[in-house]
Image: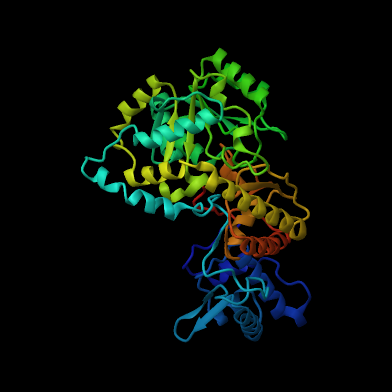
Amino acid sequence: MQHSIPPGGRVSGFRLAKLLGEWRRRGARHGSADLAAAVRMLVLDGRLPAGTRLPAEREMAEALPVSRTMVSAALDQLRAEGLVASRRGAGTWISLPSGGALVGGADTPLVGSSMVDFARAAPPAIPGLLPAFDAVRARLPEQLVDHGYYEHGVPELRRRIAQRFEARGLPTSPDQILVTSGAQHALALVLRMLTGPGDRVLVEQPSYPNALDAIKAMSAIPVPVAMTDTGWDLPGIAAALRQAAPRMAYVVPDFHNPTAHRMDAETRAELSDLVRRARTPLVVDETIVELDLDGDPLDGPPPVASFADDLVVTLGSASKSHWAGLRIGWIRASTEVVHRLVSSRTALDLGSAVLDQMVLAELLTEPEAGLAERRRHLAGQRDVLMAGLREHLPQWRFDRPGGGLSVWCELDAPVSTRIAVVAQNHGMRLAPGARFGAHGGFERWLRLPFVLPPDVLREAVRRLGLVAAAVSGGGSVPHQEVEVPVA
């Protein structure tokens, strides 16, 4: 397997020749064009990252071996495309187009000046956020005379969250709510309470990458149970509960991340019966429950806690429904579990930001006002993304998600990581399918969020089509990990 050159490093003539391999395609008359095309493919593949210094023309000509005139002509072509830059006394290095063309010669301008982030499934702030800050500002002085520590959370916010559970048919008191600094913080607190090094945790396969990372950070062992084409494999879950005896199970039943499946009421009841018989605590991630794009969240399946309240710990968050910048999440559990969590929390933090909690409480006073608009925008962006995929990537398969924030695409070949690597040279960050597997895999899958504006989505999918076309040209997957933040 060929290895990538580290960004900012120098590739020798010998190494470049090894990377190029059999680059000639059409004989000596087209030598410079073939050489330029071969170097271009190395850039597209990520094996010659931006900033890599190329050997001098004489060294390159000797290593290939070809005439110096051919090397010079090939580099001139690459300079014209913006893939190579040179400066007297500084040499020649791999570059990227700086605002006009896309890598590969396309003539459509880049959307904005920064990378298009297809790795984070996180929308911008909900309409009404600034008015909520203004409303809270008038009430802030009453908080400033106190110490500002709320280990359980601001009482008003806990009351509003409990009311939202009530509206979904799950009786809940504020004493059953613990406010956290996001759902990831909530999961870390629960893992710290329920598991230890070497303990097993049942997870879906695929699953949310940050949840898998949190489990591994506790030195616990994820036990994956594969999802089916339609959802959850209950016999597989039953077998894992019986054979692995996990200390807890983690599931995302509402618009599962990344597949977007939603667990129906019957399956929730059966799953609850399984964990009750195994006496296994079930951690339910409801981060995306409010993003029902085809209906009303209040009319959806009942919360899993409705079927096994004593064993279920429910996680929620404002990050996807309102704005990730608020950094507010919550845990709903029995009062006993909440008390245990608060007792252990003080070793890590002493409560979440009061101002953020007050803002979310204000937004939850009339929750549907902003959430309905959020769902309408997301539904339109979902349709734009799917139309773009059908136009530019008809060979990829996907199901229309009924909610959530992303489309889970099945590719026509196991090239997910390679696409993510090449996409960086086209101004896009992608999370390869392997990030969603407990132990890697999923090279035939890619998660594409639809949280960006429609015009950006259209251009990004067009660009993704160019990437897929370049990757389909063959060659091995570059030996390179894609390290991008995922949300």
Image quarter where the N terminus lies is bottom right
What color scheme is it?
rainbow
Using the image as rendered, state which of residue 466 and residue 378 is in the foreground.
Answer: 378
Which residue sits at x=61%, y=69%? 17
How many callouts does the rendering have?
A: 0
In the image: residue 222, left or right of residue 22: left
In the image: residue 30, left or right of residue 319: right
Residue extending farthest top: 277
Using the image as rendered, state which of residue 435 and residue 210 is in the foreground.
Answer: 210
Using the image as rendered, state which of residue 468 and residue 100 is in the foreground.
Answer: 100
Which residue sits at x=38%, y=54%? 134
Q: Position of residue 484 (x, y in %)?
A: 51, 53
| 86 in relation to 333, above or below | below
Q: Position of residue 419 (x, y in %)?
A: 64, 56
Q: Which quadrant holds residue 307?
A: top right
Q: Position of residue 3 (x, y in %)?
A: 56, 58
Q: Is residue 218 visible?
A: no
Q: Position of residue 81 (x, y in %)?
A: 63, 78
In the image: residue 327, left or right of residue 68: left
Q: Is residue 482 visible?
A: yes
Using the image as rendered, state which of residue 180 and residue 17 is in the foreground.
Answer: 180
Which residue sits at x=65%, y=44%? 293
| 180 in relation to 471, above or below | above
